[in-house]
Image: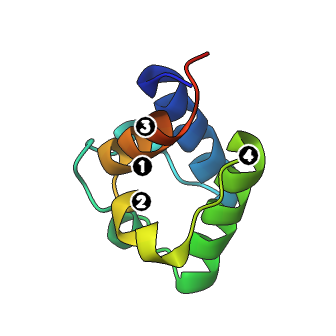
Amino acid sequence: MNRDAALELIKEVLADVVPGADPTALSPEENFRDTLEMDSLDFLNLVEALSGRTGLPLPEADYPSLNTLNGCADYIASHTSPA
């Protein structure tokens, strides 16, 4: 998956996991967990949804890489095969 596709997927999943959230209003380096006031269960739902949609295992040790749109997109793009 390329980075642009990963970014779109993340925005879709964020919108599903956090009702009323507008992922398009987030800046790429903004910590969306803080901005969207996601609790740990919301974040876990995001991780599980991303894992399910990408087929990637997302270990807890990598969660810090998944807190911003850029970090999450870079992580997914670098861990999946180009599509």
Q: Which residue occupies 63% across, 39% down?
A: 12
Q: CA distance from mark 3 to mark 2?
A: 13 Å
Q: Nearer the viewer, mark 4 or mark 1?
A: 4
Q: How far across and down, in percent of the image, does residue 65 sit?
A: 35, 61
Q: How far across and down, in percent of the image, does residue 34 sit?
A: 34, 72
Q: Earlier in the sequence, mark 1 or mark 2?
A: 2
Q: Earlier in the sequence, mark 4 or mark 2?
A: 4
Q: Which image quadrant is residue 20 in?
A: bottom right
Residue with the mark numbered 1: 72
Q: How far across and down, in percent of the image, does residue 83 sit?
A: 61, 15
- In the current view of this chain or complex, which residue is farthest to the right? 52
CB under 8 Å between discs 1 and 2: yes
5 shown above or below 47: above
Which kind of residue does numbered mark 4 sit on? Gly
CB under 8 Å between discs 3 and 4: no
Q: Locate residue 4 relative to residue 51 in the image: left or right.
A: left
How many neighbours does mark 3 have within 10 angstroms: few (below 14), some (14-19), or many (20 or more)?
some
Q: Nearer the viewer, mark 4 or mark 2?
A: 4
Q: Earlier in the sequence, mark 1 or mark 3?
A: 1
Q: CA distance from mark 4 to mark 1?
A: 15 Å
Label placed on residue 82: none
For the residue labelled by badge 4, is the local secondary structure a helix, a strand or a loop?
loop
Residue with the mark numbered 2: 66
Label placed on residue 78: 3
34 shown above or below 10: below
Q: How far across and down, in percent of the image, does residue 37 sit?
A: 44, 74
Q: CA distance from mark 1 to mark 2?
A: 4 Å
Quadrant into which the N terminus falls: top right
Q: Earlier in the sequence, mark 3 or mark 2?
A: 2
